[in-house]
Image (cartoon, grey):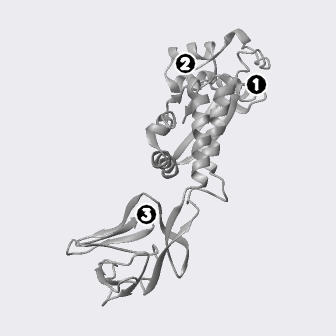
Amino acid sequence: MGLDAYVTCNCFEEGKLSNPPEPFTMDDVCRDEEGFLCSHMLDSLRKSLDYSDYIDRHGALDDCFHDWADHACEHENGEYCSEWVGNWTGVREFQSVVEELGGNDRYPVLSGLIPDSNGGCFPAKLAKKAIEEIDDLVESARSLVFNSLVCEDSESPIWSCADHASHPILMGSGFEMGMEGDAAYFVDGKGRTLKSRRFRQDPIGPEGENGSQEMVITLHETGERIRSFDSIGPYDAPKVAREFWVEPREAPFMCEGRYCRAERIRSLLVASAETGNPIRWC
């Protein structure tokens, strides 16, 4: 599950469609609420019958029309642009990046761009301003420093965090561990908050019945020790002694300097600006 989007073309309005198959005529063709080509004749027949009777009597005619509509112009399905924006985790990541880099104060249009669920549309009149904002966002994202918590036997970061952000990673009774800027933080059973850029975990005693493994965390800078109810990570890896440290890395949503999800959204915005048609979310 995720979010897709499309912008319809203007070939119908500009008279660039091929002729529909008989018994349909161009006067019979219109657009539905979602921007797709439809038929007045079929709409009338559909309203007079329940769905199963309509398919039994007119299914072949319906297929004939929609087969034509899918290829009536140079744009497949009449879509000037269509993009898979991403799964919902990726979509929410984009929203969090917008918030982290300035939010509504800096990006008033982008802050309201993405819907909370499938459906709805984004008006074309806002597309030009949104393009300006997303170009600024991408440029800012390229220089954004992300600090990643890594360990000696895993190539992938356990967690990444922007310079001024704070995120909990592991929470339990009397213990919390997370990232804050360029360091890991630990809250122990005494309510103390300790920070470290490098630390070690060592298992204590047998593994618990629920699969957890108690650890002692030793901070490199001070030698202080904190007890954790479970391993820091990586997820699904053996719960053994490990060294951890924080280092700067490219933001996790970037790929060799490119923010691909933002590029896909920008393509939709450009299509909307060029056609004057809204972005429709699906």
What whole-number distance in Å separates the C-alpha atoms at marks 2 and 3? 59 Å
Instruction: Mark 1 or mark 3: name the one nearer the start of the chain.
Output: 1
Q: Residue at x 66, y 53 (%)?
A: 258
For marks 2 and 3, give the one nearer the viewer: 3
Residue at left 45%, top 84%? 242
Amino acid under disc 2: Arg
- Name the kind of residue labelled 3 in the image: Gly
Name the residue carrying label 1.
72
Q: Residues within 10 Å of mark 3 (few under 14, many from 20)?
A: many
Of the image marks 2 and 1, the number of the one nearer the N terminus: 2
State the residue lying farthest toward the top: 27
Q: Which residue is mark 3?
A: 181
- Cα distance, mark 1 to mark 3? 54 Å
The residue nearer to you, when weighing 116 against 190, is: 190
Q: Is residue 168 above or below residue 273?
A: below
Q: Quadrant of residue 66?
A: top right
Whether residue 42 sits left or right of residue 231 in the image: it is: right
Q: Helix or strand or loop: what does disc 1 sit on? A: loop
